[in-house]
Image (cartoon, rainbow, N blue to C red):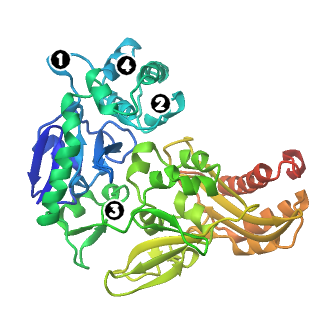
């Protein structure tokens, strides 16, 4: 049995944990404001808010696409649909009013998703800025308005939120009808629900080795939604010990397999190690998907163009895999893939942790990606580079590339060719030539063989131009 709050209602359901939250909301609770669009997490029409109780007994709300949210992941949380934010007597909330005033709704199909994303932005504990406002709606698509009206609505809303009470944000928001007053009771209700679960654990997920492991759902619920509804699933998204990012005394950074892409982006530790991390993460999916998708899921997907896989290949990351309670072992990420969508781990082994050596002062790192759309799209080609440089010479190097082979590629010969070399246009040109001999792209919907070869060449140039602008110019490289 799953237990959670849906808007202002306590829910108890024995629906399959692997079914989607979208279907439960629409077909079992008859809340039709949440729309069915792409069912792939791209359009944002099905966006809801998911509130999770924090250690300080506050509730953190994140926007998520309900079409890819496993129903089991709602367990113990507060799920909010558009019906759950409606003000009394049919009046509009400030978010809805801002969209109306700026002409941000035409056909109206996508409007609910924008409303929910901007309501989540209003509930954030972070300062509201123009940048955070636009980031909040980066997972929502509108084909009527041309976006400018929605951008104006977002800016108007951001100005209203400038006066938000940071000490008592829920009271401030409820008083101004951003959210109904019942939101203020949710922390206590989730605390009571948690206490009840601790004394009487309640979930219809399964812990058997034969069950399908299910994390954030952003991949499996695209590929096999009907299958997941019918089979036992082992829920790991909320499993204690599989989240959190820490640095050990030996300098290695360790994080749990259920750590999400957004956990990475928001981590002070990761931001300190990678100052340009927010820019890299903007290229990876959208805010709602980053809120859901786990790093381990991206690895185990085994996609040749997995963005986080390519990122961590260049960092020489390892994964700890094992059967819970029966031991574990470490595998280099570069050794995890034996062929297209084929892994070297056993079928019953789960990813438990991911770890890598933290970059040292003076180390250089960069991530690049090209896709048909700049944001919220799968890469045509992506690449990452890590370099240890002293006095203008490369001491160590690791370069990865995606979209140019059957697996996420660590370019071993290209990396080795850079070691001991001075950073010059000739060195970079020689390395890009070697890279061309290490890849084997195919023509597909994301580009031809020649296009992908050209993209990798340009991305390698981009790495060095970004990292060493004082030593190289684009004119010299081409």
Q: Nearer the viewer's eye, disc 4 or disc 2?
A: 2
Residue on which disc 3 sits = 215
Q: Residue at x 57, y 46 (%)?
A: 278
Residue on which disc 2 sits = 128
Could you say whether the residue bearing mark 2 is in a helix, strand or loop?
loop
Are discs 4 and 3 less than 8 Å apart at CB? Answer: no
Please tell me whether residue 124 is drawn above or below residue 308 in the rendered image: above
Q: Which mark is residue 90?
A: 1
Residue 451 percent coordinates (x, y) = 67, 52
Q: Residue at x 52, y 51 (%)?
A: 265
Residue 374 percent coordinates (x, y) = 57, 41
Q: Residue at x 17, y 42 (%)?
A: 6
Could you say whether the residue bearing mark 4 is in a helix, strand or loop?
helix
| C-alpha span from label 4 to label 2 | 17 Å
Residue 244 percent coordinates (x, y) = 43, 62
Q: Earlier in the sequence, mark 4 or mark 2?
A: 4
Q: Residue at x 42, y 20 (%)?
A: 160
Q: Is residue 204 visible?
A: no
| C-alpha span from label 3 to label 2 | 30 Å
- Circle 1 crowding by C-alpha within 10 Å: few under 14, some 14–19, many from 20: few
Indicate the quadrant containing the N terminus: top left, top right, bottom left or bottom right.
bottom left
Q: Which mark is residue 171?
A: none
């Amino acid at each position: 049995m799953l237990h959670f709050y849906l808007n202002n209602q306590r829910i108890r359901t024995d629906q399959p944990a692997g079914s989607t939250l979208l279907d439960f909301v629409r077909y079992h609770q008859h809340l039709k404001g949440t729309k069915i669009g792409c069912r792939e997490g791209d359009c944002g029409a099905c966006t809801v808010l998911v509130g999770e109780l924090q250690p300080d007994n506050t509730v953190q709300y994140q926007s998520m696409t309900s079409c890819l949210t496993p129903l089991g992941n709602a367990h113990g949380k507060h799920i909010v649909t558009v019906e759950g934010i409606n003000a009394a007597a049919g009046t509009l909330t400030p978010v809805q009013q801002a969209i109306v005033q700026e002409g941000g709704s035409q056909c109206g199909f996508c409007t609910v998703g924008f409303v929910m994303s901007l309501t989540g932005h209003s509930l954030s504990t972070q300062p509201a800025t123009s940048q955070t406002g636009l980031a909040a709606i980066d997972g929502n698509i509108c084909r009527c308005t041309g976006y400018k009206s929605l951008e104006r609505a977002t800016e108007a809303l951001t100005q209203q939120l400038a006066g938000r009470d940071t000490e008592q944000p829920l009271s401030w928001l409820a008083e101004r009808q951003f959210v109904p007053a019942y939101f203020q009771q949710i922390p206590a209700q989730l605390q009571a629900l948690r206490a009840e679960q601790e004394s009487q654990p309640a979930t219809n997920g399964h812990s058997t080795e034969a069950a399908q492991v299910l994390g954030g759902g952003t991949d499996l619920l695209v590929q096999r939604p009907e299958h997941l509804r019918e089979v036992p699933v082992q829920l790991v998204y909320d499993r204690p010990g599989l989240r959190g990012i820490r640095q050990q005394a030996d300098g290695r950074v360790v994080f749990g397999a259920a750590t999400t892409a957004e956990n990475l982006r928001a981590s002070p530790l990761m931001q300190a190690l990678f100052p340009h991390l927010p820019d890299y993460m903007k290229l990876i999916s959208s805010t709602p998907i980053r809120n859901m998708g786990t790093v381990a899921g991206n690895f185990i997907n085994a996609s040749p163009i997995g963005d986080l896989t390519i990122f961590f290949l260049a960092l020489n990351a390892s994964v700890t895999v094992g059967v819970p309670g029966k031991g574990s072992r470490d595998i280099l990420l570069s050794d995890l893939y034996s062929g297209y969508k084929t892994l070297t781990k056993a079928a019953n082994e789960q990813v438990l942790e991911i770890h890598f050596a933290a970059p040292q002062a003076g180390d250089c790192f960069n991530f690049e990606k090209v896709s048909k759309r700049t944001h919220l799209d799968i890469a045509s080609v992506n690449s990452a580079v890590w370099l240890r440089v002293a006095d203008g010479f490369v001491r160590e190097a690791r370069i990865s590339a995606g979209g140019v082979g059957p697996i996420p590629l660590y370019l071993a010969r290209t990396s080795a060719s850079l070691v001991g070399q001075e950073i010059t246009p000739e060195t970079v040109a020689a390395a890009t030539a070697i890279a061309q001999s290490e890849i084997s792209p195919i023509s597909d919907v994301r580009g031809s063989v020649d296009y992908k070869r050209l993209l990798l060449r340009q991305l390698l140039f981009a790495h060095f131009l970004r990292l060493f602008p004082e030593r190289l110019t684009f004119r010299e490289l081409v």
